Image (cartoon, grey):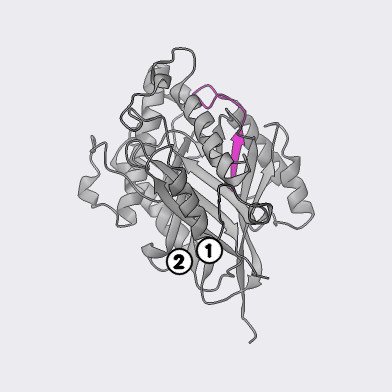
Amino acid sequence: MPMDRGREAVCLTLDMPDPGDASALAAAIADGRVSREGLRGVLVKTPGNGLTNDHSRTLAIRSIEAALGPGPGPMILASGGTEGVAVPCMILLGEKPGRSRSKGMALGLGTGPAVPAGGHGGMPMAQAAAKALEAAMAAAGIATMADVDLVLLKAPLPTPLAFAGTEDAYAALKGRTRGAAALGLAAGLGEIPWSAVKPRPDPALHASRVLVAAGTDVAAPEALVIGRAAGWGDRLAARCGLLADMLDAPGAAALLGQVGLTAAPQLSAAHRARLRGVIVKGEMPALLRGTRPAALDDSDIHPNRHFRAALSGMLGGLTGDARIFLSGGAEHQAPPGGVLLAVIAEQEGKP
């Protein structure tokens, strides 16, 4: 039976060993694996420290922007820190013309309103994030909240020069900004009531399919939605879930199984070849199965650096691939001690 022309999602994971070198992105565009116009998001993992003064993220963003050239571009999320076995990489998310079936993996990019000064860590940020979600769903043609698999959001931050406070206070604002945006998205998805979005929300309150980063290079929140919609090909599938904790290898294996990949105990070469992207958000828990991790008391190495090293090892052991977008700072994006995990894979037998 002939199929209508539609859209098809694209997901590629590429090495980026140097944040100043985006040649892998330029090559992917040049050889047609993804088009400049069809690119919707770039998630880049850089080899910096992942903390407030990690300038490798800024360099990576500038390198990607230079490779793309002038004009409207994709949302760029940069996360520093490739401790342990993690490999600096970028995940490209885009679309191209394709054969549509009943419903397939869909992508949409949307922007919310600018956030006023002083509103970054509160209700103005939450409401602006929800508006960005609405715009992204409309761009993808995703009809219902149930068809949203993952929302990636970049929240705006004031520059350090515009912020009157210490480095610790600025880091705290960054965390409140991520948290407010996450709760706004959770309310927009219908997971929590808007009445729960308060200046001092319950720390246990969380979304279940939201990843938020914050940066000074945007003035308004940008959302990239991954979900399912009519008019899209079904070559790729994405699933998102919450792991109980950073040791929950069975939960990660079960999520891989939802996209047709079997970790027994590691993906075979054939299944690993179909894995297109692994996206993670979390942080070192206060308690790990009843025991306080010593990493929380390490005066030399930040706890989130220990977290990234440990979790990259656990997930790399399951998949056989350490190219993972693994981001810290999970305020209201997972339950306390939990981990957000999303996987994208090519479906077996799909042309």
Question: Distance between the Cα atoms at labels 2 and 1?
Answer: 7 Å
The amino acid beneath tag 2 is Ile
Q: Is residue 281 visible?
A: yes
Quadrant, the N terminus:
bottom right
Q: Residues within 10 Å of mark 2 (few under 14, many from 20)?
A: many
Say whether marks 2 and 1 touch (CB < 8 Å).
yes
| Residue in the picture at 25% in, 44% down | 197
- Lower sequence index among marks 2 and 1: 1
The amino acid beneath tag 1 is Ala
Q: Position of residue 52 (x, y in %)?
A: 49, 24
92 relative position to 133: left or right: right
Q: Position of residue 127 (x, y in %)?
A: 33, 48
| Residue in the picture at 37% in, 48% down | 128
Q: Residues within 10 Å of mark 1 (few under 14, many from 20)?
A: many
- Furthest residue toward bottom: 1
214 relative position to 119: left or right: right
Quadrant, the C terminus:
bottom right
**132 inside magenta stretch:** no
Compared with 233, 238 (above or below) is: above
Compared with 331, 186 (above or below) is: below
- Residue that carries the numbered disc 1 in the rendered image: 106
Q: Which residues are magenta?
A: 39-54
Mark 1 secondary-structure assignment = strand
Q: Nearer the viewer, residue 13 or 226?
A: 13
82 relative position to 193: left or right: right
**44 inside magenta stretch:** yes
Q: Which mark is residue 142?
A: 2
| Residue in the picture at 46% in, 53% down | 254
| Residue in the picture at 36% in, 26% down | 172
Q: Is residue 77 visible?
A: no
Mark 2 secondary-structure assignment = loop
